Image: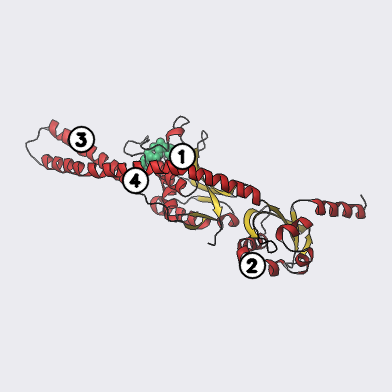
Amino acid sequence: MDESLKQAVTRNILESMALGLMVVGHDGEVVVVNPALTSILGYTMEELTTSSWGGLFFSRDENREFNDALMEVISLELVNFHRRVPYTNPRTNSQMMLSLVSSFLREGEELTGVVLLVEDVTEAHQRLQRERRLLWERNILQRERADGLKKLALSVAHQVRNPIMSIAGFTQRLLKSEQLSENAREKLEIIIEESGKLEKTVKTVADYASLAPPVKGRVEVGGMIDDIRRATQERYDLSPGVDSNAALLALCIAGDRTQLIRAAMHIVDNAVEAGADGLKIHVSETADGDIFINITDNGPGIGHDELPYIFDPFYTTKPHAVGMGLTEARHIILDNQGDIIAESPPGQGATFHLNFPVAPCHL
Ligand SMILES: Nc1ncnc2c1ncn2[C@@H]1O[C@H](COP(=O)(O)OP(=O)(O)OP(=O)(O)O)[C@@H](O)[C@H]1O
Ligand SMILES: [Mg+2]
């Protein structure tokens, strides 16, 4: 193909494609822009090509996330970076959701430009938000029922706590008597042991039932993972590996940081109790703009027939456990607009997949 034909084909593709395309040169100047990009970003071709992109986009505070994403792509040289960011079109003032994908132009070793593909995904995003809202409203009914059950559980726990303490206390006193037969002593020790178990169950149920609604803030994914790693190190002298990249770790979710860490620690506790001595946290992003946090251990895994029950209250395979850890973890994650599922392929330990919608880091 001769050179002029090649150029005509390229120009035609650039002009007819629905995706916005921008090539930013080495010095920050916009080298190539196609018409779709001008209408998506609300700047004319001239504005985009004569100013540096920094000068254009940094002037608007509401587009800070868009600016930050651009900065990250360029400064961290993120190839195949994919991010959804809100954007306010300066011409129409409409609030949009843009999908950004990046790649780089290189000549040999040298970086010569950043290629950015920009897609307007506002409609798909709004549809997703509507579906989420519907699901949330539907969950309210379930929530109200669950709240009623929580109140009942809490009052039963209060009612049961005092009699258990009395039973254990009086039994202790009886055990001090010197005239006890060996047989009687054994029975009293069983009573003490069983009261201890009952007390633990009552305490766990009371803790679960008195869990406060989440206090939502912005939780940076990387910071939250650091906290989980620190807590795991302190509790078990174990340091989970993290498989992610800086851009994903800089994303945020809307949630209650303390509660989310508490939920994650139930997963860590189980892994260690199952005999795992290695944990890996893998962070990724879905095409819908959700963040995925997978926690995988190298323990024996969870049996195929056990998997459907592990989130049920009081389901346990451990002799002295209550079986409320994963029930509480799931409750917290759902309350924080997330979701959790478990998977355990034979011979590959257990993996808990947590996902949350990404939220803007700045309120
Ligand atoms: N990582 C894991 N590896 C193997 N089995 C697991 C793992 N995580 C959960 N399980 C199984 O799921 C069950 C339920 O877990 P859950 O945390 O709800 O209760 P528990 O650990 O038994 O008791 P509790 O958390 O109240 O002390 C466990 O008893 C165990 O059989
Ligand atoms: Mg547990």
Q: CA distance from mark 3 to mark 4?
A: 28 Å
Q: Nearer the viewer, mark 3 or mark 2?
A: 2
Three-letter code for the amino acid on which mark 1 is drawn: Gly
Q: Closer to the camera, 245 or 236? A: 245
Q: Which residue is mark 1?
A: 299
Q: Nearer the viewer, mark 3 or mark 4?
A: 4
Disc on the earlier residue, 1 or 3: 3
Q: Which residue is mark 3?
A: 190
Does dot 2 land on a helix, a strand or a loop? loop
Residue 165 location, quadrant:
top left
Residue 316 is situated, as x and y percent measured from the top left of the image, at: 37, 36
The residue positioned 45% from the left and 51% from the top of the image is 260
Q: CA distance from mark 4 to mark 2?
A: 46 Å
Q: Is residue 288 visible?
A: no
Three-letter code for the amino acid on which mark 4 is drawn: Ala
Q: CA distance from mark 3 to mark 2?
A: 70 Å
Residue 309 is situated, as x and y percent measured from the top left of the image, at: 43, 34
Q: Which residue is mark 4?
A: 209
Does dot 3 land on a helix, a strand or a loop? helix
Residue 196 is situated, as x and y percent measured from the top left of the image, at: 24, 41
Query: Which label number is shown at residue 60?
Result: 2
Three-letter code for the amino acid on which mark 2 is drawn: Arg
Q: CA distance from mark 1 to mark 2?
A: 50 Å
Q: Closer to the camera, 47 or 167? A: 47
Q: Residues within 10 Å of mark 1 (few under 14, many from 20)?
A: many
From what the image shows, is residue 237 above or below residue 200?
Answer: below
Question: Badges 1 and 2: C-beta atoms under 8 Å apart?
Answer: no
